């Protein structure tokens, strides 16, 4: 059975999809070897979502 993250789902005519994001807080993984975006902290997640926070 396909997972919800690998296939767009439809709810009342609205297409929805979930894309995985890996949180690697200790920076142990090489992002070049992964098939999804890698972030290291909440600020990077907010940037991916288009939310800009001033320091």
Image: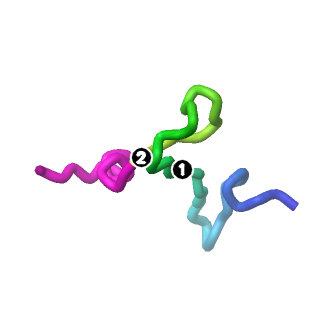
Residue 13, numbered label: none
Using a 10 Å C-alpha cutoff, classify the residue at mark 1 as few (fewer than 14 neighbours), some (14 to 19) or many (20 or more).
Answer: few
Can you give x and y, in whole percent of width and height, for residue 5 in the image? 67, 56
* Extreme-right residue of the structure: 1
Using a 10 Å C-alpha cutoff, classify the residue at mark 2 as few (fewer than 14 neighbours), some (14 to 19) or many (20 or more).
Answer: some
- The residue beneath circle 2 is 40
Q: Nearer the viewer, mark 2 or mark 1?
A: 2
- Of residues 43 and 10, which is closer to you in this image? 43
* Extreme-top residue of the structure: 32
Helix, strand or loop at label 1? It is loop
Asked if the magenta segment contains residue 27, the reply would be no
The quadrant holding residue 1 is: bottom right
Residue at image location 35% in from the left, 46% down from the top: 44
- Of residues 5 and 11, which is closer to you in this image? 5
Mark 2 or mark 1: name the one nearer the start of the chain: 1
Helix, strand or loop at label 2? It is loop
Can you give x and y, in whole percent of width and height, for residue 34 in the image? 63, 35
Task: Say left or right for 19 vs 44.
Answer: right
- Of residues 3 and 17, which is closer to you in this image? 3
**29 up-or-down from 19: above or below:** above
- The residue beneath circle 1 is 21
Residue at image location 71% in from the left, 51% down from the top: 6
Task: Say left or right for 31 vs 7.
Answer: left
Task: Say left or right for 48 vs 27.
Answer: left
Residue at image location 57% in from the left, 37% down from the top: 29
In magenta, the rendered stretch is 41-55
Can you give x and y, in whole percent of width and height, for residue 35 in the image? 64, 36
């Amino acid at each position: 059975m396909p997972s919800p993250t690998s296939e767009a789902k439809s709810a009342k005519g609205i297409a929805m999809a979930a894309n995985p994001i890996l949180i690697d807080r200790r920076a142990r993984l090489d992002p070049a070897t992964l098939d999804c975006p890698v972030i290291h902290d909440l600020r990077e997640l907010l940037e991916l979502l288009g939310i800009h926070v001033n320091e």
